[in-house]
Amino acid sequence: MESIIYQNQEIKRWDVGPSTFLALPEKGARLLNWHINMSDGSVRDVIHWPEEHDSISFEDTHGGIPILFPFAGKCFDSGKEDHWRFGQHSLPMPMHGFARNSDFRIRSMDKHGFEVELEPKEEIKAFYPFDFTFTVIYHFLELALQISLVLENEGREPIPWSAGLHPYFQLPWRKDLELKDHRLEINAKQVFQYDSGGIMKKTPNPNADCILDDRNLINRVHYELKKPEANISLLNQEEPIKISEVGGSEIGSRLTFVTWTKDGAPYYCVEPWMSPPNAPENKTIRQVPPGGRDEFTVEIELA
């Protein structure tokens, strides 16, 4: 494990077999990059991190794997943007929550990964007025990565949450390829198109297998999965990446995928969330009872 300095932050590096992982554990608990060192000496990026990022704030950089907590996506309280309702109160909530902009404290770190704990500053109470401990655990393998999000309720009332991950996969994978050369397979019973104002329009008869240049995949919500996984590959199904839920209570029953990219971007996001966006208003949140613990663990694997 090595260290690199970036914007006055210490980037940690793990080399595990052919894989190299770069992360800033104390800044948003964020993995920056995962790349494979190929046998011919070349490098294949699995998780994208932009080469030119110095002019962009860390929080706004499109890359790595931002942590989405306590709620993934935007929240609305009866149409009021960036707010959610808790009992009789309408509370502010930034898009994707506050964890990706927060500081974390290192609990442990070794050659296999790290565990960090969110430092709950006083201003967080305005968004999320609970007594809690939120930890993020990374486990690095030769051809896989596991991330666990764990919420522990330290208070006397149930705590709602619906967290997620926002991985920026490097796509296309090679310079001679385009999005149309890649496919995505997500077998879902319910598929929605996410629109402005938190509106979700149901997509009738969706295909489980799509080509990644399909513009309808942008802001698409894949819900009630028949299998708790998504698969990205070339059209011939070679060089696959599998994203799946592998840990936590009722594995797969709550998993949702959201797909998104920008025109001409060198990345594509296939995001595993605990539920669809606007979870508090859509009644798809999870509740952690007093003294309880809940976990959401996702594995990204080069299958």
Image (cartoon, grey):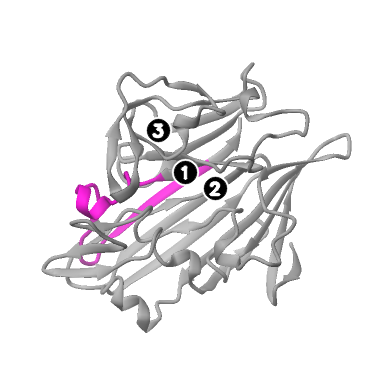
Label 1: few (<14), some (14–19) or many (≥20) C-alpha neighbours in 10 Å: many
* Magenta stretch contains residue 91: no
Say how many tags the image has: 3
**Disc 3 and disc 2: Cα gap in Å?**
17 Å
- Residue nearest the viewer, comparing 171 with 238: 171
Closer to the observer: label 3 or label 2? 2
Q: Residue 228 bears which disc, if any? A: 3
Q: Locate residue 125 relative to residue 143 in the image: left or right.
A: left
Q: Quadrant for residue 291, please give it.
A: bottom left
Instruction: First in sequence, mark 1 or 3: give its number.
Output: 3
Q: Quadrant of the C terminus?
A: top right
Q: Residue 167 bears which disc, if any? A: 2
Instruction: First in sequence, mark 3 or 2: give its number.
Output: 2
Q: Are marks 1 and 2 in contact (CB under 8 Å)?
A: yes
**Disc 1 and disc 2: Cα gap in Å?**
6 Å
Q: Quadrant for residue 211, please give it.
A: top right
**Which residue occupies 67% across, 27% down?**
239
Q: Secondary structure at mark 2?
A: loop
- Residue nearest the viewer, comparing 25 with 187: 187
Q: Secondary structure at mark 1?
A: strand
Q: Residue 271 bears which disc, if any? A: 1
Q: Locate residue 16 relative to residue 124 in the image: left or right.
A: right
Q: Position of residue 173 (x, y in %)?
A: 70, 34
| Residue 295, placed above or below residue 226 | below
Q: Amino acid at mark 2?
A: Pro
Q: Position of residue 3 (x, y in %)?
A: 75, 68
**Disc 1 and disc 3: Cα gap in Å?**
13 Å
Q: Are marks 3 and 2 in contact (CB under 8 Å)?
A: no
